[in-house]
Amino acid sequence: MSKKRMRRSFSKEFKQDAVNLVTHQGYSLKTAAEAVGVETRLLRDWHEKLAPIPQPCGDEASVEELKAENRRLRKQLKNAEIEREILKKATAYFAKESQ
């Protein structure tokens, strides 16, 4: 006999509370995921969608804050470049298909 696995669903409030553990209370993604009983990958997805956008560092920022912002911006740039390449390929594919 095969048992069907029930897919759990989570409310928006539950997801936001889980993300808040990481963003406001300083938990790591792994620790927060274990605390709320979900996979780390799932919490990471929620974090990408629900976490507030970090504010840019001001003139009084420390070196560590600037380094963290630099890492975040590099990652954001890399993702934008990947998305742009995907869109270029999709545009070329659909232009070729329509001819």
Image (cartoon, rainbow, N blue to C red):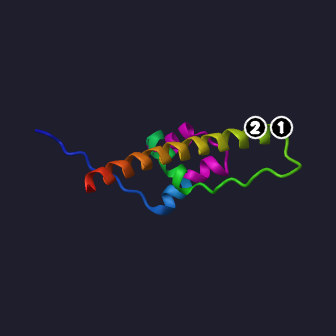
Q: Position of residue 64 (x, y in %)?
A: 79, 37
Amino acid type of the residue tagged 1 in the rendering: Val
Residue at point 50% right, 42% down? Answer: 82
Label 1: which residue? 63
Amino acid type of the residue tagged 2 in the rendering: Lys
Work out whether residue 77 or residue 46 is closer to the camera in this orientation and state it. Answer: 77
Q: Does 76 sit left or right of 37 as displayed?
A: right
Q: Does 49 sit left or right of 91 as displayed?
A: right
Work out whether residue 67 or residue 87 is closer to the camera in this orientation and state it. Answer: 87
Q: Does 62 sit left or right of 99 as displayed?
A: right
Task: Tell me the quadrant of the picture where the N terminus can be found.
Answer: top left
Q: Position of residue 11 (x, y in %)?
A: 44, 61
Q: Position of residue 13 (x, y in %)?
A: 51, 62
Q: Is residue 72 above or below residue 53?
A: above
Residue at point 64% right, 50% down? Answer: 23
Q: Which residues lie in the magenta part?
A: 19-38
Label 2: which residue? 67
Q: Residue furthest left?
A: 1
Residue 78 is tagged as none
Q: Position of residue 21 (x, y in %)?
A: 60, 49
Magenta stretch containing residue 32, yes or no?
yes
Q: Secondary structure at mark 1?
A: helix
Residue at point 72% right, 40% down? Answer: 70
Mark 2 Cα-neighbour bin, 10 Å: few <14, some 14–19, many ≥20: few
Main secondary structure found in the magenta portion: helix
Query: In the rendered image, which quarter is residue 95 located in?
Result: bottom left
Q: Are marks 2 and 1 in contact (CB under 8 Å)?
A: yes
Q: Residue furthest front?
A: 99
